[in-house]
Amino acid sequence: MGFPGLALIAVVALLGPLLALPRRWHLPVVLGELLAGIAIGRSGLQLVDSSDPTFTFLADLGFALVMFVAGSHVPVRDRLIRPALGSGALRAAAAALFAVAVGWGIAAGFGTGHAPLYIVLLASSSAALVLPIIDSLRLGGVQVLALTAQVALADIAAIVALPLAIDPPHAPRAALGTLAVAACAAVLFVILRRFELSGGRRRMHHLSEERRFALELRLQLAILFALAGLAVFSHTSILFAGFSFGLVVSAVGEPRRLAHQLFAVSDGFLGPVFFVWLGASLNLRDLGQHPDMVLLGLALGAGALLVHCATRFLGQPLPLGALSASQLGVPVAAVAIGSRLLLPGEAAALILGALVTIAAAALAGARAARSYSLPSTDDAAA
């Protein structure tokens, strides 16, 4: 992929802001970027090749950065986060239990024999989709904090469980990789916390601002890419690497200037590249050759919504329950890992199910924005 292809991606990614522009629609920016990717990718005009090494690498960079920014926005030091963590963990566990029954039922009904895979998919949530929606719609409050914790825990658990469900021989290796990334994140917290308390970070900040060195941004990106490299080497998810380092930065304290720099890199370039690549990588053409898999995809999408909205009995509002049902990275990873194990057309069915949850998430986000949106800076100034 050269500059013309990159220019095309940048142009079509503008569909995200265009769809999100009318405030009354309350649509997330990532929705338009995904639709743009579908339009020019494997399911549409085929103007870009999602398997291109350069495109894939840029998308991986975007994924790592999106998850890092999402993790850094989790208010770890907020006193309300501890009860929210408990509520989020309880709801994630309840959704997993419901997923067992629904997943077995769908597998039995369609005779695929892939109940463990369906259970992981139904129980999963997409932090890569939900957290940007929360950020772009400025959702806040105790219930949204609990949703953030629930989605993060469910996504990480699903990433860890996916190899066991679809590729058991490689599951121990993935688990060890996850532990290695978690251990590195813990060590980084100790080092960066001491650097902060000693005043080293403030001295570096003043020097960087005075000399325009952007030292903090360079350091954060170097650490992020090193963790992502460890995740790839140890066969675990870039999602976990980016999100865990984001949590570390949030716990230590992120300078406002650095947050603005990261926003420019992530939301202005690499984030849109990732979401366009993701849409371009989806292949929905196979559904036309296997009509029964259309029903399977719809059943998986509806099942995910049922599983997550059932947490209403634990006090979670229905719009936030539907938002937590959204799937993105886990179905795509399942298709990639299990390409030789899935039935003909089943990969497209998994993607169709994910698209059902994404559509529901967009509607749920619009509904949630009416009740849980924080006031904008303009409103606060007024």
Image (spheres, rainbow, N blue to C red):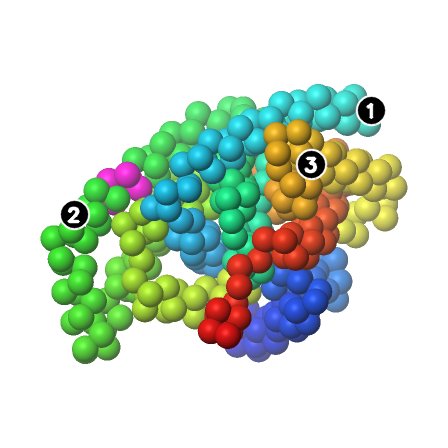
State the residue position of label 3. 309
In the foreground, 89 or 45: 89
Closer to the camera, 329 or 170? 329
Q: Which of 294 and 49 is in front in this view?
A: 294
Assess whether mark 2 and mark 1 are in contact (beta carbons under 8 angstroms): no
Disc nearest the viewer among 3 and 1: 3
Quarter where residue 218 is shown:
bottom left
Label located before the other in sequence (3 or 2)? 2
Q: Does residue 337 appear left or right of residue 217 in this picture?
A: right
Residue under the point 40% across and 36% down: 82
Which element type, helix, strand or loop, lies under badge 3? helix
Callout 2 secondary element? helix
Q: Residue at x 47, y 38 (%)?
A: 84
Answer few, some or many: residues within 10 Å of disc 2's Cα (few below 14, many 20 plus, some between 14 and 19): some
What secondary structure is found at the residue carrying circle 1? Answer: helix
Position in image of residue 209 (x %, y %): 22, 74
Residue at left 69%, top 41%? 318
Where residue 165 sits: x, y (%)?
A: 59, 26
In this rendering, does residue 280 appear at all? no
Image quadrant assignment for residue 105: top right
Give the class, few, some or many, for how many residues have Cα within 10 Å of label 1's Cα (few <14, many ≥20). Answer: few
- Please give left or right for residue 84 compared with residue 162 in the image: left
As measured in the structure, the alpha-carbon distance from the residue carrying label 1 to the one carrying label 2 is 56 Å
Residue at which label 2 appears: 194
Quarter of the N terminus within the rendering: bottom right
For the image, the number of numbered tags is: 3
Q: Give the range drawn in magenta.
A: 184-188
Is 263 above or below relative to 234? Answer: below
Residue corresponding to mark 1: 109
